[in-house]
Image (cartoon, rainbow, N blue to C red):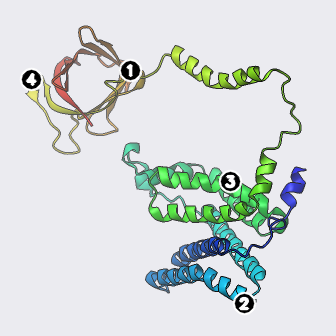
């Protein structure tokens, strides 16, 4: 049943509609998908010979023409001077071809190392200093086999779309891939160009799926053939289902949550640092002076000495009754002298003072 379902032609059960609304929907997708693919590929490969503004202008003209096409099409069709069904098929196949070309080029770009490029110098900078876009590229760049896997999926989708019997399967397979990519673009603040491009490709996919929506919905909501329903009363089934939401709440209530001091969690700038009553402040990046303190989950704490490569990392114990704090270090060595002192909250500020390595320290912590 499943193989037969996916083997059927996407358009075989769709009757040609003469409505202007459907023509506008088709021509909009045609203009956007073909235009976006042309603009992306031509800018990447033809810009050394053709000025990008000219390519952009050509794309805009094409899009405007595509938006005007449904009105011309509709008026001439009423006069029986155009084969509307034939034009619809041609436009749809051009969308499919443009989409397939775009996807297969994305795939080969990944294999050839032309995508997910991050300068080596950037990779050695602190994680928190990287932009969302750089984080995404660095993550995927880390594993070339995984990058190739994504590329192969995109190439397979392109091939599936070119054949009538596998087109529907290719469209369905493209949905999670494009949704995932579009979500990455949106939530990781990728520049608007790739985000808009991904949305346009999704629009083209949904155009074709919308034509076969009834058949798809009927297939998706069919009972699973190899699984039988439990023969128990309905109220017990509902309890069984609701329990899925009860268990997470129960486990949350009994779990020892790692954020033991949420009011302290965060990154702090060290101000007014005094060591043995003498004021210190880093004046150059080379000055190894305590500048930042991180208070993290599981009562972890880090002292940053003006460079992420020079840090003390350990765990603190806080007695909130008398504000006493003890820090036991484990990095760079567990032999380091513990910090013992007080962490006082007053007038909206945190004041940390105590002793470590035979020296007295006093500072104000300002939360970033």
- Secondary structure category for the residue under label 1: helix
- Give above or below for 324 relative to 122: above
Q: Are marks 2 and 3 in contact (CB under 8 Å)?
A: no
- Give above or below for 183 relative to 192: above
Residue tagged by mark 3? 149
Q: Are marks 4 and 3 in contact (CB under 8 Å)?
A: no
* Residue 137, visible in the rendered structure: no
Mark 1 crowd level (few <14, some 14–19, many ≥20, 10 Å Cα): some
Which quadrant of the view contains residue 15?
A: bottom right
Horizontal side, residue 61 vs residue 71: left or right: left
Q: Earlier in the sequence, mark 2 or mark 1?
A: 2
Q: Earlier in the sequence, mark 2 or mark 3?
A: 2
Q: Are marks 1 and 3 in contact (CB under 8 Å)?
A: no
Which residue occupies 45% across, 62% down? 192
For residue 79, the mark is: 2
Percent x, y for residue 5?
86, 55
Q: CA distance from mark 4 to mark 3?
A: 60 Å
- Give above or below for 110 relative to 351: below
Which residue occupies 76% across, 89% down? 80
Residue tagged by mark 1? 299
Q: Earlier in the sequence, mark 2 or mark 4?
A: 2
Q: From the image, state whether disc 4 or disc 1 is nearer to you.
A: 1
Q: Are marks 2 and 4 in contact (CB under 8 Å)?
A: no
Residue tagged by mark 4? 277
- Secondary structure category for the residue under label 2: loop
Q: Earlier in the sequence, mark 4 or mark 3?
A: 3
Q: CA distance from mark 2 to mark 3?
A: 51 Å
């Amino acid at each position: 049943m499943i193989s037969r379902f996916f083997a059927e032609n996407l358009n075989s059960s769709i009757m040609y509609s003469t409505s202007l609304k459907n023509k506008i929907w088709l021509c909009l997708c045609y203009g956007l998908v073909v235009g976006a693919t042309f603009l992306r590929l031509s800018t990447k490969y033809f810009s050394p010979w053709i000025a990008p503004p000219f390519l952009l202008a050509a794309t805009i003209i094409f899009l405007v023409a595509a938006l005007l096409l449904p009105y011309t099409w509709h008026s001439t069709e009423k006069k029986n001077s155009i084969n509307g069904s034939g034009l619809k098929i041609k436009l749809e196949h051009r969308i499919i071809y443009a989409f397939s070309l775009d996807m297969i080029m994305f795939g080969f770009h990944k294999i050839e190392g032309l995508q997910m490029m991050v300068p080596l110098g950037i990779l050695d900078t602190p994680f928190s200093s990287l932009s969302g876009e750089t984080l995404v590229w660095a993550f995927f760049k880390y594993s070339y086999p995984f990058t190739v896997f994504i590329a192969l999926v995109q190439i397979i989708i392109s091939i599936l779309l070119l054949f009538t019997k596998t087109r529907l399967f290719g469209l369905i397979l493209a949905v999670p891939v494009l949704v995932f990519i579009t979500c990455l673009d949106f939530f990781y603040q990728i520049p608007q160009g790739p985000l808009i491009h991904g949305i346009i490709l999704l629009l083209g996919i949904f155009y074709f799926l919308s034509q076969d929506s009834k058949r798809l919905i009927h297939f998706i909501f069919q009972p699973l053939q190899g699984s039988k329903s439990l023969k128990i009363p309905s109220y017990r089934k509902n309890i069984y289902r609701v329990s899925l939401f009860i268990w997470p709440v129960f486990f949350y209530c009994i779990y020892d949550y790692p954020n033991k001091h949420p009011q302290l969690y965060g990154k702090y700038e060290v101000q007014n640092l005094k060591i043995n009553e003498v004021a210190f402040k880093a004046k150059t990046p080379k000055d190894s002076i305590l500048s930042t303190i991180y208070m993290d989950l599981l009562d972890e704490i880090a002292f940053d000495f003006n460079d992420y490569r020079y840090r003390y990392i350990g765990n603190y114990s806080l007695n909130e009754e008398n504000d006493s704090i003890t820090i036991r270090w484990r990095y760079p060595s567990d032999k380091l002298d513990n910090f013992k002192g007080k962490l006082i909250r007053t007038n909206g500020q945190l004041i940390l003072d105590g002793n470590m390595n035979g020296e007295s320290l006093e500072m104000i912590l300002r939360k970033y």
